[in-house]
Image: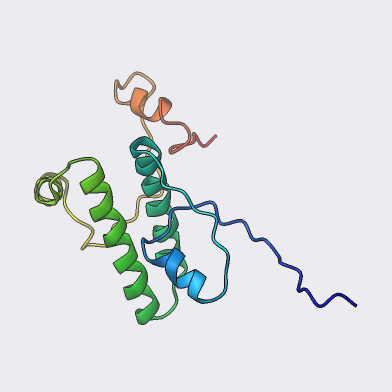
């Protein structure tokens, strides 16, 4: 009988927090890691933002939602830093959008729109079919 334990490998394939390799190694894991270049980093941060937003969506308790929103904030700040965007510029853009288009406080849900075929704004919907599929 072989005394050596068999190692099992699990695919991660995502950006992780800076201290996680050290934490995982302290738990007895072998970690295959690398430092990514700036372009890949930005792409991975965008994927991470979607991942964290999905985790917010799936969170059940207020504690879970709070933790996941903290992750969203961390990714957002990292993405700003990586793109040399001052977070104050993001906040200014948010305020500007809220002033011109409103926020989400009224809880308005839009099921669909109908638009005449000759209305020039129809191009927006036709050019964004994945986001706005046409109902027949």
> Looking at the image, is 118 positioned above or below residue 98?
above
Q: Picture coordinates of residue 95 (x, y %)? A: 10, 51
Q: Picture coordinates of residue 115 (x, y %)? A: 36, 30
Q: Quadrant of the N terminus?
A: bottom right
Count up the numbered dots: 0
Front-most of residues 17 and 76? 17
Front-most of residues 11 and 21? 21
Q: Is residue 98 left or right of residue 62?
A: left
Q: Picture coordinates of residue 25 (x, y %)? A: 51, 70
Query: Which residue lies at the image location 42% right of the left edge and 58% below the top edge?
Result: 16
Query: Which residue lies at the image location 67% right of the left edge and 61% below the top edge?
Result: 9
Front-most of residues 4 and 9? 4
Q: Picture coordinates of residue 73 (x, y %)? A: 27, 61
Query: Which residue lies at the image location 22% right of the left edge and 47% below the top edge?
Result: 80
Query: Which residue lies at the image location 37% right of the left edge and 53% below the top edge?
Result: 49
Q: Is residue 19 left or right of residue 136?
A: left
Q: Is residue 20 left or right of residue 101?
A: right
> Looking at the image, is 63 positioned above or below residue 35?
below
Extreme residue toward the right, this view: 1
> Looking at the image, is 71 positioned above or below residue 46?
below
Q: Quadrant of the C terminus?
A: top right
Find residue 123 and report its image quarter. Answer: top left
Find residue 22 and report its image quarter. Answer: bottom left
> Looking at the image, is 127 positioned above or below residue 131?
above
């Amino acid at each position: 009988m072989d005394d050596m334990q068999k190692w099992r490998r699990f695919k991660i394939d995502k950006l992780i927090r800076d201290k996680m390799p050290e934490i995982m190694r302290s738990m007895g894991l072998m970690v295959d890691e690398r430092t990514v270049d700036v372009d890949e980093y930005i792409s991975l941060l965008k994927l991470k933002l979607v991942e964290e937003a999905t985790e917010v969506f799936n969170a059940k308790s207020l504690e879970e939602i709070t933790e996941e929103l903290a992750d969203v904030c961390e990714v957002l700040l990292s993405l700003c830093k990586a793109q040399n965007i001052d977070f104050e510029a993001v906040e200014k853009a948010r305020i500007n959008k809220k002033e011109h288009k409103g926020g989400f406080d009224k809880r308005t849900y839009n099921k669909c729109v109908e638009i005449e075929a000759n209305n020039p704004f129809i191009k927006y919907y036709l050019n964004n079919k994945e986001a706005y599929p046409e109902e027949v």
